[in-house]
Structure formats: C-alpha cells, structure tokens
Image: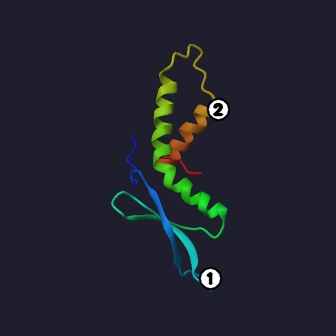
C-alpha cells in the first residue's frame, strides 16, 4: 500500500527568480508551484537542461498517475503465459521509487 505523501498535480512553472546561493551572483531559478500557490521545487535554469528538469518535475504528478493507470490496464489483459515485459518491470520499479518503496 502507498503511504507516501506528495503534492498532487497539476504543478506549474512560474517565471524566473534570481536566487542567491553559493555562486558570486544570483542565478536564475524556476519556481514550481501547486494549485494553492505553494512552492514545490526551485530549479536552477542556467541552461536548457535546467529548464528541461523544471518541466520534468512539473509533469511528475501527471506522469505518475498515468503510469499507475497504464500498469493496471496492461495487467488486466489476459496473459496465458504470464509474461511480464521489461517495460512493465521498469514501470513498476518507477512507481515503487516514486512511492518510496524502492531507491534508485
């Protein structure tokens, strides 16, 4: 059973904020907020990879729910040979990591 708590979606990326950290000058960061305007994550976006990470984090709740639904649908199909594909195993592992039942 999943007892892990996380912020449900949808999440959104809010513009760029300059944040002081260990760098000499403030660096641009994207703020990821939930529907109540609470800050969920702060992601450094000094390059395209940083912005991509922000989008991935914002999409995580929706991807998590979609992956759980997809694994239930796949498991519901008749499978007389009881074959579990590597894709199914990867999906189940990703869900377990998201729920805190397994670590990377």
Query: What is the spatial separation of the Cα atoms under label 1 and label 2, in whole angstroms?
Result: 43 Å
Regarding residue 100, the answer to whether it shows in the image is: no
* Colour treatment of the image: rainbow
Classed neighbour count for the residue bearing mark 1: other residues with Cα under 10 Å, few (<14), some (14–19), many (≥20): few
The residue identified by callout 2 is 86
Name above or below for residue 65 compared with residue 58: above
94 horizontally vs 33: left or right: right
User: Could you say which is closer to the camera, residue 80 or residue 66?
Assistant: 66
User: Could you say which is closer to the camera, residue 28 or residue 67?
Assistant: 28
Location of residue 9 in the rendering, given as x and y in whole percent from the top left corner: 41, 50
| Residue drawn where x is 60% and y is 38% of the image | 90
User: Could you say which is closer to the camera, residue 84 or residue 33?
Assistant: 33
Q: Which mark is residue 93?
A: none
Location of residue 85 in the rendering, given as x and y in whole percent from the top left corner: 63, 28
Regarding residue 71, the answer to whether it shows in the image is: yes
Q: Secondary structure at mark 1?
A: loop
67 horizontally vs 10: left or right: right
Farthest bottom residue? 24
| Residue drawn where x is 56% and y is 41% of the image | 93
90 horizontally vs 67: left or right: right
Location of residue 21 in the rendering, given as x and y in whole percent from the top left corner: 56, 80
Name above or below for residue 62 compared with residue 30: above
Name above or below for residue 84 compared with residue 7: above
The residue identified by callout 1 is 23
Q: Secondary structure at mark 2?
A: helix
């Amino acid at each position: 059973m999943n007892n892990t708590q996380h912020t449900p979606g949808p999440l959104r990326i809010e513009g760029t904020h300059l944040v002081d950290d260990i760098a000499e000058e403030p660096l641009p960061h994207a703020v990821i907020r939930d529907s109540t305007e609470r800050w969920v994550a702060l992601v450094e976006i000094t390059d395209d990879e940083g912005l991509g990470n922000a989008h991935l984090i914002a999409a995580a709740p929706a991807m998590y729910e979609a992956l759980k639904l997809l694994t239930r649908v796949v498991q519901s199909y008749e499978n007389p040979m009881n074959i579990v594909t590597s894709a199914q195993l990867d999906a189940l592992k990703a869900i377990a990591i998201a729920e805190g039942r397994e670590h990377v």
